[in-house]
């Protein structure tokens, strides 16, 4: 581990076994713990570091050489610290992530896909989190992404914390997707191709980081995505070249909108897309519009910020879906987008943002 280069090349097929070869011993033990807890399937009343001796989960905490080893902290992104684990300063990895119960971040439930994999979205650490202390959590997650190092995932439910297992981080801007990884190699159902990220200034993605105009331009250019043209062509065919909301049929004005944020080639499927007019696409990505299931149809709902604009006329518009059922938008993805819309809308109300 001490000899790891400060800039490890991104890899095409990250795996559990490969990651074990260059992380500290304690990380491997912690990963084994996450895999065991995933199989056990029990719920934790509290995160392991806050579990009391009278809790039924107490015996299941991780110990290394008879010493308790933490796999969680109150912060949404956790690493054990150099007092417990020896890691080079230039490549320190996050160990686990969990969603927030306090509503400070736009967290939504994991999405379970048809092939048995799942997507867990979590927010980048705010610069004001943890009492203003700068633990550089976001960079530790970037290091995991660059080196193909998995993180353990907890998901908070109303009944307690569920251990989802291990995941590989995929690149997103503010909210990040993580796909599952299993012991012995990559999940055979999904090989994440990370090569498209090699030239991107990933540190500029996070809300707390500054970026020059030149970096922003380079980043925008790097967002040319694998499979994007094929994805767009398939959506044009599925929606017969018309916007699913406005009916616009001007090719140059139409864009392929992802329902779930892009997280690698696997997200480039028609059921994760809607053909939208460019301005509606922008509003959809900004969670200023979404869709709600009403009497069997998905109808457009718009933010109160749009109530005095021309876009108010689209409220209640029925989302036109493809004729072929397997090409229709994934209902779980639409529900997750609506949950993020609701969260964004509540934040806008709380901040008393005036309508346009």
Image (spheres, rainbow, N blue to C red):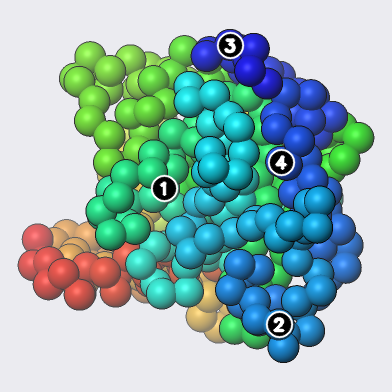
Label 2, label 3: how many angstroms apart (C-alpha)?
42 Å
Tell me if residue 247 comes above or below residue 1 in the rendering.
below
Between disc 4 and disc 1, the foreground one is 4
Between discs 2 and 1, the one toward the N terminus? 2
Q: Which mark, residue 5?
A: 3
Query: Which element type, helix, strand or loop, lies under badge 1?
Result: loop
Between disc 2 and disc 1, the foreground one is 2
- The residue singled out by tag 4 in the image is 27
**Residue 326 percent coordinates (x, y):** 74, 52
- The residue singled out by tag 1 in the image is 124
Label 2, label 1: how many angstroms apart (C-alpha)?
32 Å
Label 4, label 1: how many angstroms apart (C-alpha)?
22 Å
Q: Are marks 3 and 1 in contact (CB under 8 Å)?
A: no
Asked which quadrant contains residue 206, the reply is top left
Residue in the picture at 76% in, 36% down: 25
In this view, the residue in front, 14 or 59, is 59
Label 4, label 3: how many angstroms apart (C-alpha)?
19 Å
Residue in the picture at 54% in, 42% down: 83
């Amino acid at each position: 581990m001490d000899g790891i280069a400060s800039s490890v090349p991104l890899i095409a097929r990250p795996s559990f076994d490969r990651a074990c070869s260059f992380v500290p011993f304690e990380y491997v033990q912690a990963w084994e713990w996450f895999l065991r807890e995933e199989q056990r399937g029990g719920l934790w009343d509290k995160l392991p570091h806050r579990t009391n001796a009278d809790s039924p989960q107490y015996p299941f905490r991780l110990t290394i050489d008879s010493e308790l080893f933490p796999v969680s902290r109150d912060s949404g992104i956790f690493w054990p610290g150099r007092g417990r684990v020896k890691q080079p300063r230039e490549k320190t990895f996050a160990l686990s992530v969990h969603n927030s119960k306090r509503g400070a971040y736009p967290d939504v439930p994991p999405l379970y896909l048809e092939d048995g994999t799942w997507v867990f979205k979590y927010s980048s650490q705010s610069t004001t989190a943890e009492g203003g202390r700068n633990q550089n959590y976001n960079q530790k997650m970037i290091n995991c992404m660059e080196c193909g190092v998995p993180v353990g995932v907890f998901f908070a439910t109303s009944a307690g914390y569920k251990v989802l297992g291990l995941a590989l981080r995929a690149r997103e801007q503010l909210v990040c997707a993580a796909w599952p990884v299993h012991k012995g190699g990559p999940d055979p159902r999904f090989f994440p191709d990370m090569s498209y990220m090699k030239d991107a200034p990933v540190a500029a993605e996070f809300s707390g980081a500054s970026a020059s105009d030149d970096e922003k331009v380079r980043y925008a250019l790097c967002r040319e995505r694998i499979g994007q043209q094929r994805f767009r062509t398939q959506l044009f065919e599925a929606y017969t070249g018309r916007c699913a909301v406005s009916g616009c049929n001007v090719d140059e004005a139409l864009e392929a909108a992802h329902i779930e944020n892009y997280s690698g080639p696997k997200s480039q499927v028609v059921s994760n897309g809607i053909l939208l007019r460019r301005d509606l696409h922008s509003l959809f990505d900004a969670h200023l519009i979404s869709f709600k299931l009403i009497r069997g149809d998905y109808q457009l709902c718009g933010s109160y910020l749009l109530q005095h604009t021309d876009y108010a006329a689209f409220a209640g518009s029925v989302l036109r879906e493809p004729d072929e059922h397997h090409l229709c938008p994934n209902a779980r993805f639409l529900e997750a987008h609506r949950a993020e819309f609701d969260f964004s809308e509540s934040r806008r109300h709380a901040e008393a943002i005036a309508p346009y």
